[in-house]
């Protein structure tokens, strides 16, 4: 008679318990850490701006604005009609800035999700199985580390086409390597715990152990890495767009900077350069400050510092 799988303390309900404990810990950190609280507030503002962007923008970001003489309003400073001035093409900087928040957050969230999914699974399987599986997967990770990001994006975009989807794809195919190593190192300690060994002895399948007993215990770390990858993806999209490989059919902060640079307006049109630069910086700060709460919740020893 085959032995029945045991029911260690950590079971399928541990996902709910993990989220509850993580939420409580994060809430406690937010109530004590001002930077984390400020980060959450800033991130919430950016999300609201992105959601209601069409209602906040005063002009169509691609519209070429003209004056009463039907001349293009080129590189005009901030005014009542154009809060942040205009570009060399007569487009409203404020409206481009507002609509650009959608691209930044969309790329950040989707790329971070796919990066985390790929990296988590490779880290889980490498750390759990060990042996030749671990060696094979980690050597593959080492190979991926040898591939520089920007040249990889240039080649991928050249083969396909410049688009937001391809930028997300390029980030997802390469950046997971960091997540994989971090998750693997945590899994190596989790698999040595008594309830995991008990599940193996009781006859639980490897996949059951990985997803029901190991995964819940690395979930807080996964969420932390996902938040950090979101910031990385936002910066990566801005960088790729700045060098001219962004989506020409969308408005992003990186493209705003690229157009200003190409037009030679870096020095004379500060209102064209400063807003997207500040927006990128504030978004990254918001994500990092928010992830600070998760980091302290995952590693309580940081509270003593």
Image (cartoon, rainbow, N blue to C red):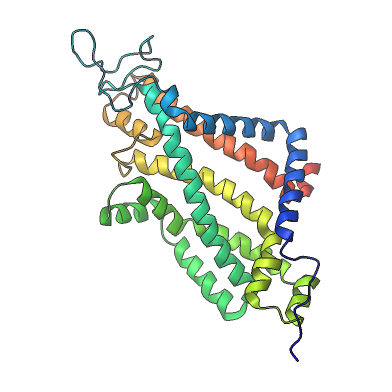
Comparing 251 with 288, the one in front is 251
Residue 88, position as x, y percentages in the image: 26, 22
Residue 289, position as x, y percentages in the image: 63, 37
Comparing 80 with 180, the one in front is 80
Query: Taking 134 as reference, is 174 left or right?
Result: left
Residue 113, position as x, y percentages in the image: 52, 52
Location of the N terminus by quadrant is bottom right
Above or below, 232 relative to 96: below
* Residue 235 in view of the camera: no
Residue drawn at x 50%, y 55% is: 115
Residue drawn at x 65%, y 70% is: 210
Query: Taking 256 as reference, is 46 left or right?
Result: right
Location of the C terminus by quadrant is top right
Above or below, 35 relative to 6: above
The residue most toward the front is 1
* Residue 188 in view of the camera: yes
Residue 41, position as x, y percentages in the image: 62, 30
Q: How many marks?
A: 0
Query: Taking 127 as reference, is 29 left or right?
Result: right
The residue most toward the left is 70
Query: Taking 40 as reference, is 34 left or right?
Result: right
């Amino acid at each position: 008679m085959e032995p029945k799988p045991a029911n260690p303390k950590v079971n399928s309900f541990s996902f709910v318990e993990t989220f509850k404990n993580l939420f409580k810990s994060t809430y406690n950190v937010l109530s004590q850490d001002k930077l984390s609280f400020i980060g959450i507030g800033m991130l919430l503002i950016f999300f609201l701006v992105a959601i209601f962007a069409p209602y906040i923008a005063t002009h169509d970001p691609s519209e070429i604005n003209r004056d009463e003489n039907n001349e293009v309003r080129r590189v005009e400073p901030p005014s009542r009609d154009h809060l942040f001035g205009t570009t060399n093409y007569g487009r409203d900087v404020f409206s481009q800035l507002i609509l650009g928040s959608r691209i930044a957050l969309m790329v950040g969230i989707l790329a971070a999700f796919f990066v985390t999914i790929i990296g988590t699974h490779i880290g889980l399987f490498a750390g759990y199985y060990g042996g030749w599986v671990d060696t094979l997967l980690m050597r593959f990770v080492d190979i991926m580390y040898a591939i520089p990001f920007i040249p990889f994006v240039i080649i991928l975009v050249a083969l396909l086409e410049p688009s937001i989807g391809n930028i997300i794809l390029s980030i997802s195919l390469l950046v997971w390597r960091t997540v994989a190593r971090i998750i693997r190192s945590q899994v190596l300690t989790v698999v040595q715990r008594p309830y995991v060994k008990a599940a193996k002895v009781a006859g639980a399948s490897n996949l059951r152990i990985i997803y029901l007993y190991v995964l819940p215990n690395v979930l807080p770390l996964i969420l932390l890495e996902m938040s950090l990858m979101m910031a990385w993806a936002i910066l990566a999209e801005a960088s790729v767009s700045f060098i001219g490989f962004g989506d020409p059919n969308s408005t992003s902060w990186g493209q705003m900077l690229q157009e200003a640079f190409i037009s030679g307006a870096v020095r004379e049109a500060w209102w064209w350069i400063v807003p997207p630069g500040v927006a990128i910086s504030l978004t990254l700060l918001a994500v990092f400050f928010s992830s600070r709460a998760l980091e302290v919740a995952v590693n309580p020893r940081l509270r003593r510092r």
